[in-house]
Amino acid sequence: MLVKIEQLEKQYPNFHLDCSMEVKEGQITGLIGQNGAGKSTTFKAILDLITFERGTIQIFDQDCHDLTREEKCKIGVVLSDSGFSNYVKVKDVIRMMKAFYPAFNADDFQYQCERFGLPLNDKIKTFSTGMKAKLKILAAMSHDADLLILDEPTAGLDVVVRDEILDMLREYMLKEGRGILISSHIATDLEGLCDDIYLIDQGRISLHEDIVTLTECYGLMKMDETQFERVDKQYILAQKKEHFGRVCLTNEKKFYRENYPDIVIEKCGIDDVIYMTAKGEKR
Amino acid sequence: MQIIIQNSSEIPIYEQISMQIKAQIVSAELKEHDLLPSVRGLAKELKISALTVKKAYDYLEEQGFIVTVHGKGSFIASTNAELVKEELRSQVDADLEIAIQKAKSCGMTKDEMMELFLLIWEDESC
Amino acid sequence: MKGLFVKDLCFFRELVKTLVIFLIVATMMILFQDFKYENLMFVFSYMIVCSAMTSVNLIAYDQDQNGMSFLLTFPVKKKDYVRAKFLFSGFVILVVFAIMWVLSITAITVQHVPLKWESLLASSGTSVLIAIVMLSLMLPLKLKFEEKGNLIMVVTVFAAIAATYFLSKGAKYLPIDLSGIGAFFNDHTKAIIVGVLVVVAVGVICSMKISERILQKKEY
């Protein structure tokens, strides 16, 4: 287990976080939720940047407060609201990384920076949002970490660069024993990347499924009112009224397909699940 | 090894993968003891989650088409092609059955059905 | 630790220009004016305190754009951060101290003024002590209150000066003989120096501990 969060609780004046989750070796774990749902708070708690009232967080089977410098070397981090200072150049970043991480691969980092169009001799102040985002991800992947903790790494990236970065993450995973915890408020960014998905809503984990179950068992059913009346509702997670009748979210697509062949059942994406659990009436 | 997946299809992705691997075993594109790409490697190629690939491999292993040696990877098992063909034949059997049932339910005769069958069979594009 | 030092060096480049201008002015004041030990004392302490403040102000660069949270994800412990700050400031003070000594000796030789080791040592030593005290006060303040730390510092220093001024004024009217204190100082110079050193050392250790606590409790 790379990360294990048990009953983490953190109280803010208008917000309460209550979350448990795991990041397993060999898996990419996604945390998806709207802005302000508690993603960054969870990440900051993992990284010992904030205090919390209750619960435990373990990284590499160690309490997150007691990580040694060597263990911290094995973690690569992207934070959504923080990064390298505006006053340094990429060249300085290379100098610093070299001094911080014994395993930092300077040649490869420089090559990647050039490949992604990051000038080595310009101050980061002059960089665009996308360039800063690229720099942060490249830095997190540059020192042979076993665990990547990436908070909204794709925010501000255009589609082409985003896909390139996602490919790099997949390549990173080719080495055994590694794992990634990644968050985004855009589900489609993480579909096709993550193995394990957590949805977070108003500080609570509202859903946890592996991607195979999510794509195979979850579905959206569309039916009129009479169909809705007679259908067995035991596997309906949420439903919502539409002009034609009802849309229902189920996690047992197969059951309905076999028993109610006349009902329209569609494949559903993570976005649909988020939408239905947020807007629909829960059973 | 070439695999093409269709994201919009109703067929689960793991099934698309396992079906295509099976087809390649039948056509002898994949031979006994051939090494399959690693789970992560194939996931990267296909831009899908590794868990999906793993499920496809598990499924193939369950049916005896591949063997996974821990630390070495997955290999094509020593199944004979006849067995695979048999498997596929039973699938065709099942599909035909459904087609015939449908034909009967809308009142098609045997001759009409045969005619349709030959028409589709001889269609170049099929 | 090494990483934090390299990082501070990178930031220091931003501020080093100001410090160099100060140094040039100081050089002119010492070399091209008639040499007086009182002047030297002033320039010396001014330069040392300036360099200490400059290095403390590097914290602002760490804190810029919420940078502290990212910085703390690097392989450093929170106590490393505090230690590195003291270490780097100490390094800067040492460098400026060395430059000032070279300048002073040059001035004394060029202008053929009699060399007074004791006086030179006393003035340079005092200025370093003042710088260290300022540093120990500033560091926790800057960590706790970020930019507001500067303001609090200015107000505190001003209040301290005012208090001393009024106390010394007021003391005249009290039935205490201040000359006794002066005599006491002259009689026990060595003991007092040792005492001051101990107090400063304890102050530095307290400041480090307090800064560490502040970092532990702070929410980034």
Image (spheres, grey):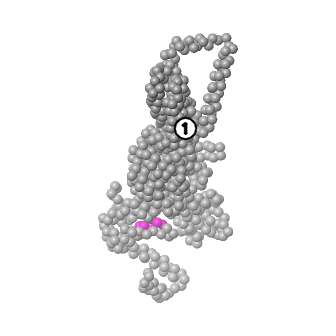
In this rendering, position of residue C204 left or right of residue B77: right
Residue drawn at x 66%, y 68% as measured from the top left: A245
In this rendering, position of residue A229 left or right of residue A265: right
Vertical side of C31 occupied by B91: above or below: below
Q: Which residue is mark 1?
A: C57
Which segment did they paint magenta?
Answer: B10-18
Q: Position of residue A25 (x, y in %)?
A: 43, 51
Q: Position of residue A229 (x, y in %)?
A: 65, 66
Residue drawn at x 52%, y 38% as measured from the top left: C21
Q: Position of residue C172 (x, y in %)?
A: 67, 15
In which quarter of the view is residue B60 placed? bottom left
Question: Is B16 inside the magenta-drawn segment?
Answer: yes
Front position in the image: A159 or A7:
A159
Q: Secondary structure at mark 1?
A: loop
Name of the residue lying farthest toward the right: C173
Vertical side of A230 occupied by B126: above or below: below
Q: Position of residue A133 (x, y in %)?
A: 51, 54
Quarter that holds the C terminus of chain A: bottom right
Question: Is A162 inside the magenta-drawn segment?
Answer: no
- The secondary structure making up most of the magenta span is helix
Residue drawn at x 35%, y 74% as measured from the top left: B27
Is residue B38 in sight in this rendering? yes
Is residue A72 in sight in this rendering? no
Q: Which amino acid lies under the numbered mark 1 shown in the image of this protein?
A: Asn
